Amino acid sequence: MEKYYIAVDLGATSGRVILASWNGEKIEMQTLHRFPTPLVEKDGKYFWDIFVLEKEILEGLSQAAGKPVESIGIDTWGVDFCCVDAEGKVSMPRAYRDPYTQGVPEQFFREMPREELYRRTGIQIMNFNSVFQAYARKEETAAADKLLFIPDALSYLLTGKMVCEYTILSTSALMNPRTKELDEDILKICGLRKEQFPPLVLPGAVIGPLSKEVADKTGLGPVPVMAVAGHDTGSAVAAVPAVDANFAYLSSGTWSLMGIESAQPVITDETFRLNFTNEGGAKGDIRLLKNITGMWIIEQCLAQWRKEGRSYTYAELADMARGCTDRETRLFDPDDPDFAAPQNMPATIIAKTGHALTDTQMVRLIYDSLAAKCAKVFQMLQGLAGAPIDTLHIIGGGSQNDVVDQLTADACGVRVVAGPAEGTALGNVMIQAGLSRKDILASINTKIYTPHE
């Protein structure tokens, strides 16, 4: 008999409600509802409109009315959180895209040095980390009765039950990854208290049934909501179709994350110097990874070219890159701060190379530079891993770019397995249904790229 599961998969750009079925052999998925992620500005501050998200999720759940749904799981981006007052009222969360934390880490480091924060949490230093958001908003967060990260806040709105899921908490730089407990010294600096956080749960825990109001409104009845890997990358990595442990992964999209799995945190002078982060995995383990700028650069070029009257599909970009006969060999670092939010991405790239480029040359240069950056991080991982890495799994939307997949295999000198593109949703369902990576492998098609001689 088929079993049905609902994956709510929210990215910082768009979200989806997906109905998945499992027949004992493979997973089939159907998108019930797709919607933009609402970023709103109010008095110069930027928020995620969590109540619009709630409404969109309810709309998606309603599309599954009549199906015998086993459970529902929610994954989102990391770091951001909601404040909840003593009456249980949820406030809209500030968005990590709001620059209000610029300069805040340096203020925090006057009370706890950068190296000490990393030693305690294993999280790479980024100015939008939860720890810096809380520090910047001490008065507001100190007054809250509870703090809920985005997937936990949405689960609360659906069930009335509060939890703090491990993988999403692990992104905050508030948790000791060795003990999986909040670090009270860090909380104190931020003006927070341990009791402001609900009980910690691991992926696979049942949070609670849909509240009667939600159950009636959606027509689903009291379906349980389950904690999956609430951090979307955690769910994506869970679905890597690996057959052994000697692999690295590249979760490829607008932003890319490359890493390995580890039973224990890897927090050393070397990982601090290389700016690697230790985030929670779906099995309570660790994802040792590094953030890399991904398809953001090509996306911003496409947006600029459209303004100038030139539009390309991704298939056309691949043909352009593949057929480029006059390549620019001076590569750039995709993680250069100048590429973070330029007014004109093509102009910024031209300024870096020092001379004009055709669109074709620019596409190929971007792809070559992305592959070279991946190779650099891959070599770092080879040095950190306890065994040789013989396969790189590329998952996420970027895995569908066959040109970059091959260039990455060539640059890293390793076999690349591309797919699944829908890794996050698959991992979400996998955790709900108690499935394995072998079940994922049986449900998808992958493509293999070997390095050219």
Image (cartoon, rainbow, N blue to C red):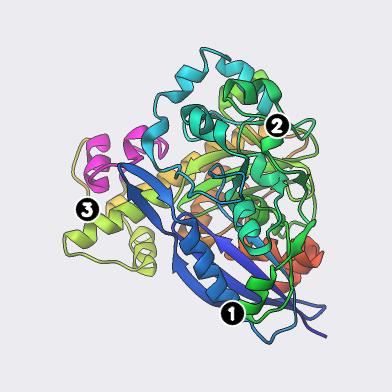
- Location of residue 338 (image quadrant): top left
Q: Residues within 10 Å of mark 3 (few under 14, many from 20)?
A: few
- Asked if residue 293 lies left or right of residue 216, the reply is left
Which secondary structure lies at badge 3? Answer: loop
Few, some or many residues within 10 Å of mark 1 (<14, 14–19, 20+): some
Pointer 2: what residue?
194
Q: Is residue 447 visible?
A: no
Discs 2/3, front? 2
The residue that appears at 31% across and 48% down in the rendered structure is 327
Of 72 and 299, nearer the camera is 72
Residue extending furthest toward the front: 87
Badge 1 vs badge 2, beta-carbon distance below 8 Å: no
**Residue for badge 3:** 358
Residue 15 in view in this figure: yes
Provide residue 219's location: percent of width, then percent of height: 65, 82
Q: Nearer the viewer, residue 79 or 422?
A: 79
Give the residue number, with chain letter if any, for mark 1.
Answer: 62
Q: Residue at x 63, y 17 (%)?
A: 116
Q: Is residue 304 left or right of residue 159?
A: left
Q: Position of residue 385 (x, y in %)?
A: 72, 34
Residue 122 vs 346, above or below: the answer is above
* Residue type, label 2: Lys
Q: Is residue 270 covered in magenta?
A: no
